Image: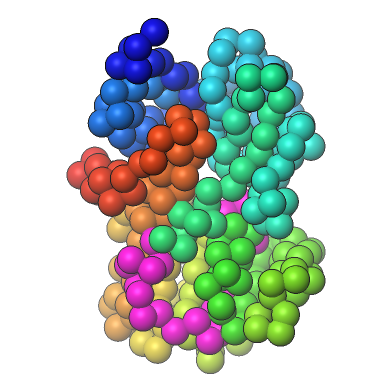
């Protein structure tokens, strides 16, 4: 088989993913590399099952010759126990968004959300004040963004989640990392209003605001013009949170950069080719 005839099958496992733009991003980038790539959506909502189906779905994908899978809500943490190996970044984050099937049959878990979000922030808000950042949402996406904030040298991360234990566990994971102390401090709190009062930035990492979960994740009056506000949601690209933040004079960052950045990292793992993240970001924005 010549390089021009190379074929790759990959997919995405998650709930409510019919609006995902990952297939188009990956398939378009593959064409630049003379790769015939087919990206399949494996939607738990369509299948009528939950994360408990992961063992069956992973085995089916392996048997059908998938090169790998992207993993999204609600499976980023549940998938870990089913994998043979974890990358250092995925292990530190405690969440996986990319699974690669090795030629030996072994499964390896990776996390490209963290470098994807770092790329987005550095390109979209290069002068963001990282002195005191509130992270709202401590699930798989939030854990990856917390990792990114540590690697960017954030001085203090305030973690807020409707599940207080999840926020506390993520805070403990951050402060016990060897690359956190003494530069990064982290704490969990249930009081979002108090956390935002003196914050320099807010990152939103819950599903609220997505096309299938419309709404605001917080009262808009908690926003103030000293904040920069980043939303991990990219569909729609213009969330109610970002509209409210701009109305109050905040600098904002939408979720498109993270979506493109993480896709580029996954593409590299799936294909062994170096993607053009700027090109993938442009493709995403044209579709949006």
Q: Nearer the viewer, residue 131 or 241?
A: 131
Is 124 magenta? The answer is yes
Is 26 magenta? The answer is no
On screen, residue 274 versus residue 198, left or right, reads left
Q: Residue furthest top?
A: 1
The structure residue drawn at horizontal position 71% and vertical position 25%, both measured from the top left corner, is 106
- Looking at the rendering, the stretch of residues picked out in magenta corresponds to 120-141
Q: Which of the 4 quarters of the picture holds residue 19? A: top left
Work out whether 160 lies above or below 154: above
Q: Nearer the viewer, residue 136 or 253?
A: 253
Residue 188 percent location from the top left of the image: 72, 75
Residue 72 percent location from the top left of the image: 56, 40
The structure residue drawn at horizontal position 53% and vertical position 73%, both measured from the top left corner, is 152
Q: Which of the 4 quarters of the picture holds residue 32? A: top left
Q: Nearer the viewer, residue 67 or 164?
A: 67
The N terminus appears in which quarter of the rendering? top left
The structure residue drawn at horizontal position 50% and vertical position 82%, both measured from the top left corner, is 130
The C terminus appears in which quarter of the rendering? top left
């Amino acid at each position: 088989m010549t390089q021009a005839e190379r074929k790759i099958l990959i997919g995405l496992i998650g709930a409510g993913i019919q609006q995902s733009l990952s297939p188009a991003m990956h398939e378009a980038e593959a064409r630049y590399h003379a790769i015939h790539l087919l990206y399949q959506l494996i939607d738990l909502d369509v299948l009528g099952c939950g994360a408990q189906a992961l063992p069956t779905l992973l085995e089916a994908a392996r048997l059908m010759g998938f090169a790998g899978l992207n993993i999204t809500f609600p499976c980023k943490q549940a998938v870990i126990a089913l994998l043979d190996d974890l990358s250092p970044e995925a292990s530190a984050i405690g969440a996986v968004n990319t699974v690669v099937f090795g030629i030996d049959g072994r499964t390896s878990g990776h996390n490209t959300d963290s470098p994807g979000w770092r790329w987005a922030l550095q390109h979209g808000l290069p002068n963001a004040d990282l002195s005191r950042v509130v992270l709202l949402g401590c699930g798989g996406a939030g854990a990856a963004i917390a990792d990114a904030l540590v690697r960017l040298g954030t001085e203090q991360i305030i973690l807020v989640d409707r599940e207080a234990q999840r926020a506390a566990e993520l805070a403990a994971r951050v402060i016990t990392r060897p690359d956190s102390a003494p530069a990064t401090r982290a704490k969990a709190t249930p009081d979002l209003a108090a956390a935002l009062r003196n914050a320099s930035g807010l990152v939103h990492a819950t599903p609220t605001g997505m096309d299938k979960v419309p709404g605001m994740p917080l009262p808009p009056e908690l926003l103030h013009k000293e904040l920069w506000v980043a939303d991990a949601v990219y569909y729609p690209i213009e969330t109610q949170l970002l509209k409210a933040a701009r109305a109050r004079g905040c600098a904002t960052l939408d979720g498109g950069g993270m979506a493109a950045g993480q896709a580029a990292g996954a593409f590299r793992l799936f294909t062994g080719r170096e993607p053009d993240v700027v090109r993938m970001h442009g493709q995403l924005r044209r579709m949006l």
